Image (tube, grey):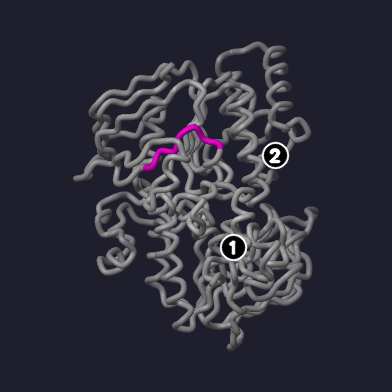
Amino acid sequence: MVLFKTEDLSFAYPKCSSNALNGINLEIKKGEFVLLMGRTGSGKSTLLRLLKKELSPFGRVTGNIVNHSQQTAFVVQNTDVSFVAENVRSELAFALENIKMKNDAIALKIGETASFFNLSDMLDKKLCELSGGERAVTAIAAAMILDADTLILDEPLAQLDPKAAAQIISLLKRVNEELGVTVIMSSHTAEGLVDYCDRLVIMEQGSIALNDIPDNLKTMDKVLDYLPVYTSLFDERPLTVKAAIPCAAALKEKPQENIVSSDTSVKVKNVTFAYGKNERDILSRLSFEAYSGKIYSIIGANGSGKTTLLKIIAGIKKPYSGKVKTCGKVAYMPQNPQYLFTKDTVGEEISDDTAKSFDLFDFMSHHPYDLSGGQMQRLALAILSQTDFDTLLLDEPSKALDAFAKKELAGYLNGLSSHGKTVIIVSHDLNFVGDISDYVSFLSDGIITLSGKRRYVLSKLNYYTTQIRRITRSYLDSAVSTEDLL
């Protein structure tokens, strides 16, 4: 049975000369798991929102959308903006109370839903106290509680650490297999999904470029940038780590690079921080040091204190003990780039030359909030580039970026480091960390438990490491990136 069908669907946002979608013809059958991929700004989010009438963006629509779904649940990229209650129980109850369900029925529904989604032990926890993964599960459970037969998700893995991302992927597979729910999700990450999904749909410039099962697409060179990084290394084109490991036996690695230290630009010594007098310490006697002209990445689980550390270095938060010393001007890009937007148009935020440098010139008349997630990231970085900083702090800079945009970001950051700037990144994107970093620090329980050169640290970790390290661990000493391979 066809659940969704679009016929020559086109869409244009107000005051935009070009369409966001062009002639989309797509059929999605009941029970399918459809993975939607494409470059930043290719129209993925717009298409997903048009499939749920209540969330359809305002603009000019042509063509038809046929929707046979009885109840469509939608989970947005930034789950925090969708929450309406203080704790998990109230969040789950909200939709049920809105349809005037009786209290006994609400209690039963919450109990059953919490059990399926493993939320029973945290029903009375405040949403602000949950980890990123727990918030994502809560958002999915709240969206599904009205017995949805379709679940649409817009980049649900973008801000999650590897463990949380794996849990969400496992959960979505259960929803699809055990409940028969149709799952449609966009993602810039294919690992753990591409071998499972029924169809891979790739969008380019508002149109569907490819639409087929992954096994039929993996041999096409133009698809490789959307697939796990190891897929392109072998003629067999493996889609999973398990399938790639035997192929990796023939790989060889380069010697480890020699990194020359320079002047210290950031020094954090014995810093301890808590958000309240009676709350636990987020950071505990933490020390960290960064050198000029180098790129540092700080990794670790959701809630481990990474963002807090960046804010302390930036001077946004003050530790109650310890010292922080920075040389020169520090610029900070938060995880939510919207915090940097203060004007009504992109053109008011940045100059023409800056817009051209960051590929935003065609959006000068747009409101910053009307940009895609990846374009917002670029705009935030463009705004900061107009300041004369010495140290750049970036919280999840590759979030919502496709493989092509990540390469552009890497080029920009490498350019900064070559000119003596210090770059400090907090990221869950471990493949990006493995490609870009000079040094990596692993933050756990409020302290840095492992720190050193990129290849040394990422080869010591089993879970918080790159795809290349996972497939070469049995054969090579320290390769963590394709650049480390001969």
On screen, residue 113 above or below 288: above
**Secondary structure type for disc 1:** strand
Q: Nearer the viewer, residue 434 or 92?
A: 434
- 472 sits left or right of 272 in the view: left
* Percent x, y of residue 6: 32, 26
Kindly identify which residue carries mark 2: 126
Q: Closer to the observer: label 2 or label 1?
A: 1
Q: Which label sits on residue 188?
A: none
Residue type highlighted by circle 1: Val
* Percent x, y of residue 43: 34, 42
Contact flag, marks 2 and 1 (Cβ < 8 Å): no
- 148 sits left or right of 340 in the view: right
What residue range appears in magenta? 196-202
- What separation in Å lies between label 2 and label 1 (alpha carbons)? 25 Å
In the rendered image, which quarter is residue 246 located in? bottom right
Q: Nearer the viewer, residue 188 or 76?
A: 188
Kindly identify which residue carries mark 1: 426
Residue type highlighted by circle 2: Lys
**Secondary structure type for disc 2:** loop
Residue at the image position 32 percent from the left and 42 percent from the top: 209
* Percent x, y of residue 453: 65, 76
Residue at the image position 61 percent from the left and 71 percent from the top: 313
In the rendered image, which quarter is residue 318 located in? bottom right
Residue at the image position 64 percent from the left and 29 percent from the top: 174
> Which residue lies most toward the left here?
17
Q: Residue 147 colored magenta? A: no
* Percent x, y of residue 265: 58, 82
Image label count: 2
Q: Is residue 91 visible?
A: no
Q: Nearer the viewer, residue 470 or 43?
A: 470
